[in-house]
Amino acid sequence: MWRRIGPSFGALVSGGVYWLSISKASGVAEPWDDGAYWRIWYPLALLICALSGYLLKKDGWLVSAIFIAAQLPVMVLVSGIGPLLMLGLLLTMALAVPAVAVSAAATLVATRVRAT
């Protein structure tokens, strides 16, 4: 359990910094409000999640989910708690599913590469 805390905390902090940087740089409250979110920022986040799956093996899926979920605290920090918070939570959970899948696939690749 203790070996998961470091990577999980690192994912929370780095994810928060990543999403906050996007929000501040683009001048939007929620990261997904930026026009480049679906073209640049979310695919880059998926690439980061794949890398975490490759490097962390079994814990990569958890780190990836936390990295994507860090958008929600950023949204609350930037725009406060509002009536769309639950919708933001649902969207964040939906966005975490592909991230976990990409991380799990990268873990499988890492396992096969290391086995050969």
Image (cartoon, rainbow, N blue to C red):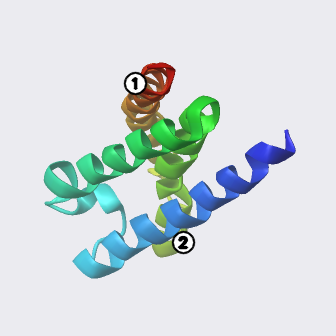
Element under label 2?
A: helix
- Residue 21 vs 99, above or below: the answer is below
Name which residue lies at 24% across and 47% down: 43
Name which residue lies at 13% across and 51% down: 39
Element under label 1?
A: helix
* Residue 6 horizontal side relative to residue 75, left or right: right
Q: Quadrant of the C terminus?
A: top left
Nearest the eye: 30 or 62: 62
Label annotation for residue 77: 2
Nearest the eye: 64 or 89: 64
Q: Position of residue 68 (x, y in %)?
A: 46, 48
Q: Position of residue 98 (x, y in %)?
A: 37, 30
Q: Quadrant of the N terminus?
A: top right
Within 10 Å of the Cα at label 1, are there few (<14), some (14-19), or many (20+) other Cα atoms?
Answer: some
Nearest the eye: 79 or 67: 67
Within 10 Å of the Cα at label 2, are there few (<14), some (14-19), or many (20+) other Cα atoms?
Answer: few
Name which residue lies at 32% across and 70% down: 22
Amino acid type of the residue tagged 1 in the rendering: Val
- Residue 17 vs 93, above or below: the answer is below
Label annotation for residue 109: 1
CA gap between label 1 and label 2 equals 37 Å
